[in-house]
Amino acid sequence: MEIKTALLLLAMIMSTSPSHSAYYTRSTAYEPVQLKKTNLRFFFHDNLGGANPTAVQIAGPRDPNNPIPFGSLFAIDDLLTESPELTSRVVGNARGMYLSSGRGDDVALVLYVDLGFTAGRFNGSSLSVFSRNPVAESRREMAVVGGRGMFRKAEGTVFVSTHFVNFTYAVLEYNVEVIHP
Ligand SMILES: *[C@@H]1O[C@H](CO)[C@@H](O)[C@H](O)[C@H]1NC(C)=O
Ligand SMILES: *[C@@H]1O[C@H](CO)[C@@H](O)[C@H](O)[C@H]1NC(C)=O
């Protein structure tokens, strides 16, 4: 009797739940929107040292003579500021990771980062960067492959140059050109 009741209940639940015939919708015409171009300029602070590092090695070999040996993976929560000084206005943070990916003398990182803005018009929006970054070159570019918020479906380029670097601390100038809806 109890089993019969349970089966009856199950049948009732199944008959009232909506029927999903497929995991996709019908395709419809995509209405293109007028895209906009925005340029951004800010400074990226990567600090591997001191009591409060913003980049920490989470995997890979350690080498006292090389802070970023091949195969080392770092998690970052780096500050983005308006001017080169760390004390200047904070405009966002770079969260994600980078991997030291060059086997030779050419130190090359591959960045997987989300540049999130916390000030101004783009507060709450972010840019997704996935690219190699040959850090020894004076001017380098990285690909912006997407974004969130006002940068949803963005694409663009980050031009990076090194403003300051020592063994444990780097200040990088980021000039971004981004195309977005
Ligand atoms: C950025 O947005 C957050 C969330 O809406 C808000 O709390 C914060 O005050 C904003 N910051 C600035 C500088 O506008
Ligand atoms: C690198 O530069 C920063 C900022 O000037 C300084 O605080 C730090 O002590 C320096 N580190 C080394 C290893 O020279």
Image (cartoon, helix red, strand yellow):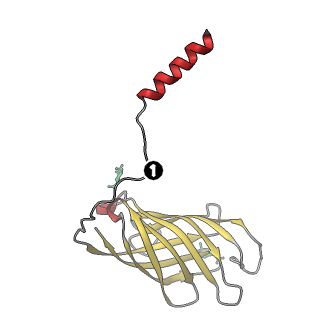
Quadrant in which the C terminus is drawn:
bottom left
Between 66 and 84, which is closer to the camera in this rendering?
Answer: 66
Q: Residues within 10 Å of mark 1 (few under 14, many from 20)?
A: few
Q: Residue 37: where, in percent of width, then height? A: 28, 76
Between 74 and 165, which is closer to the camera in this rendering?
Answer: 74
Q: Is mark 1 within 8 Å of ligand 1?
A: no
Quadrant in which the N terminus is drawn:
top right
The residue sitting at the left extreme is 34
Residue 163 vs 115, above or below: the answer is: below
Residue drawn at x 40%, y 35% as measured from the top left: 18
Q: Quadrant of residue 108?
A: bottom right
Residue drawn at x 50%, y 23% as measured from the top left: 11
Residue 98 vs 164, above or below: the answer is: above
Mark count: 1
Residue 85 vs 150, above or below: the answer is: below
Amino acid tagged 1: Tyr
Q: Quadrant of residue 42?
A: bottom left
Classify residue 41 as left or right of residue 67.
Answer: left
Residue drawn at x 60%, y 79% as measured from the top left: 109
Classify residue 68 as left or right of residue 96.
Answer: right
The residue sitting at the top extreme is 1
Q: Residue 169: where, in percent of width, then height? A: 59, 75
User: Helix, strand or loop at disc 1?
Assistant: loop
Q: Residue 66: where, in percent of width, then height? A: 72, 80
Classify residue 115 as left or right of residue 179.
Answer: right
Q: For mark 1, what is the residue?
A: 23
Residue drawn at x 46%, y 22% as measured from the top left: 12
Classify residue 144 as left or right of residue 74.
Answer: left
Q: Residue 79: where, in percent of width, then height? A: 49, 65
